[in-house]
Image: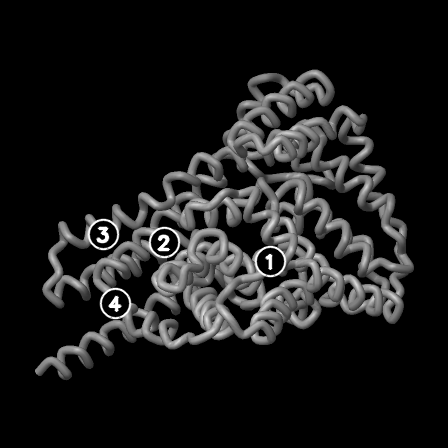
């Protein structure tokens, strides 16, 4: 009888996973708000669990307990949205794009694309904004050169996730610090160490590709248009410098962002000529230029409301994680992780689970939360929780999600850049991080984590 009930539960779980995957995949491909299929999936999952003897109040309590893990990062997410919008209004993002276009070397275009997007994503902390600003500008500049756009796109997306992984403005970095209860700046130090060799090797590979695929730039007027639209003085860099200085002083990220918003808001008013009401509106709903501007589709976005959508996805996803934990539905996967006998085995298990989570969940957020949910107990058992769990999540779920073609982490930047899944082989940095770290751990063959 027990065996029969177990098999029925497995079949129900399989049905739920298939239906949820179809809903999430359709949403990702069609561009629908991912929270809708997530909520439908949550309702289906709860309905299945109700037939297995769980009560609705207990399931709701599990969901709330899971969602509470996300509350600490929600305010940071909303601040990130405000920062991005006001930075655009202040000219901070435009001046970064402007100098990126001006300084790029056509002979080393692909390498320059990787370096530029890495630097800008490190400053602004979001892969989507990086892809839609400097990334799109670079793709447009190289159009007509005859070089495979997927090669350039791979370099851009890899660079975009350089900062998405290790910027104080990154929602993913803040989420991981929150759920692992770790210090953000300590995580940055660990990320720098574990990314050193992947970064060096990626740079060499992009240099080789640049030499093999020289790009002849056409008559690109983006820099001129940016200069005509915004007042690009050195003052417009102050919001980014504010974040940088606060981080050096290890001041709380929320305070750094709040100070940057104030500085950027003042610049938007007194240098760029926006009214205080317009700046507040930008901070809330996102920055927009007049639809007649040629930059309307490039310098746009941000806003608290845009991040409210991301916050909703995180809340629903952590509710899922809470129910998974409370009902022990995914215990069979945890048993697979528990078989790890070395540091390398554990990292390989984490990598495998993060790939499956990214493929099933269709978002980077779900990949992070599900992977954390399924490996946390093993890390605690082996004394590897905290900083070590955080860095492993950064080196797996964060960088592998963009390599899943239907995952929003890769699908959205590829759509923005007008490329297809052909960029994946050229996004060297993203898969060299887990590969080289796994090789290192296999060579060490022990659980003590050396940074």
**Residue mark closest to the camera, 2 vs 3:** 3
Can residue 69 be seen by looking at this rendering?
Answer: yes
Q: Residue at x 20, y 50 (%)?
A: 60
| The C terminus: image quadrant | bottom right
Q: Are marks 2 and 3 in contact (CB under 8 Å)?
A: no
Displayed quadrant of residue 201? bottom right
The residue where tag 4 is placed is 329
The residue where tag 2 is placed is 317
Rounded to the nearest whole Å, what is the CA distance between mark 2 and mark 4?
Answer: 15 Å
**Left or right side of 115 for 435:** left
Q: Residue at x 35, y 63 (%)?
A: 381
Number of residues whose C-alpha sits closer than 10 Å to that of mark 2, classed few (under 14), some (14–19) or many (20 or more): many
First in sequence: mark 2 vs mark 4: 2
The residue where tag 3 is placed is 62
Q: Is residue 175 above or below residue 449?
A: above
Residue 75 horizontal/vertical position (percent): 44, 34
Residue 78 horizontal/vertical position (percent): 48, 35
Displayed quadrant of residue 150? bottom right
Circle number at residue 451? 1
Rounded to the nearest whole Å, what is the CA distance between mark 1 and mark 4?
Answer: 34 Å
**Residue mark closest to the camera, 1 vs 4:** 1
| The N terminus: image quadrant | bottom left
**Residue mark closest to the camera, 2 vs 1:** 1
Displayed quadrant of residue 439? bottom right
């Amino acid at each position: 009888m027990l065996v029969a009930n177990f098999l029925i539960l497995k079949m129900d779980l399989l049905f739920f996973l298939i239906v949820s995957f179809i809903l999430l995949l359709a949403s990702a491909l069609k561009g629908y708000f991912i929270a809708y299929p997530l909520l439908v999936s949550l309702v289906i999952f709860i309905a299945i669990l109700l037939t297995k003897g769980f009560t609705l109040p207990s399931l709701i309590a599990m969901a709330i307990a899971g969602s509470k893990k996300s509350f600490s990062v929600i305010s940071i997410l909303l601040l990130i949205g405000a920062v991005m919008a006001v930075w655009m209004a202040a000219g901070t993002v435009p001046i970064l794009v402007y100098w990126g276009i001006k300084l790029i070397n056509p002979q080393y275009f692909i390498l320059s694309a990787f370096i530029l997007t890495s630097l800008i994503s490190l400053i602004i902390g979001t892969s989507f904004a990086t892809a839609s600003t400097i990334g799109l500008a670079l793709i447009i500049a190289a159009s007509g050169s005859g070089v495979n756009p997927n090669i350039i796109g791979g370099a851009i997306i890899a660079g975009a996730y350089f900062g998405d992984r290790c910027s104080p403005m990154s929602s993913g970095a803040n989420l991981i610090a929150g759920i692992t209860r770790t210090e953000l700046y300590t995580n940055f130090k660990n990320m720098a160490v574990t990314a050193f060799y992947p970064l060096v090797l990626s740079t060499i590979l992009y240099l080789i590709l640049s030499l093999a695929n020289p790009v002849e730039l056409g008559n690109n007027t983006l820099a001129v248009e940016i200069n005509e639209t915004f007042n690009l003085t050195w003052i417009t860099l102050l919001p980014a410098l504010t974040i940088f200085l606060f981080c050096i002083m290890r001041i709380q990220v929320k305070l750094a962002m709040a100070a940057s918003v104030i500085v950027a808001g003042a610049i938007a008013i007194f240098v760029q000529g926006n009214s205080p009401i317009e700046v507040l509106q930008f901070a809330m709903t996102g920055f927009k230029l007049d639809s007649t501007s040629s930059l309307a589709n490039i310098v746009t976005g941000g806003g608290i409301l845009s991040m409210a959508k991301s916050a909703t996805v995180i809340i629903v996803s952590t509710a899922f994680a809470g129910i998974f934990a409370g009902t022990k539905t995914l215990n069979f996967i945890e048993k697979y992780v528990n078989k790890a006998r070395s540091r390398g085995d554990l990292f390989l298990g984490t990598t495998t689970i993060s790939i499956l989570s990214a493929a099933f969940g269709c978002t980077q957020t779900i990949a992070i939360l599900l992977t954390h949910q399924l490996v946390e107990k093993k890390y605690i058992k082996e004394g590897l929780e905290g900083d070590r769990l955080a860095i492993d999540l950064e080196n797996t779920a964060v960088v592998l999600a963009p390599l899943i073609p239907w995952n929003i982490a890769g699908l959205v930047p590829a759509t923005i850049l007008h490329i297809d899944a052909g960029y994946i082989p050229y996004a060297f940095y993203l898969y060299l991080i887990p590969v080289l770290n796994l090789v290192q751990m296999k060579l060490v063959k022990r659980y003590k984590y050396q940074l």
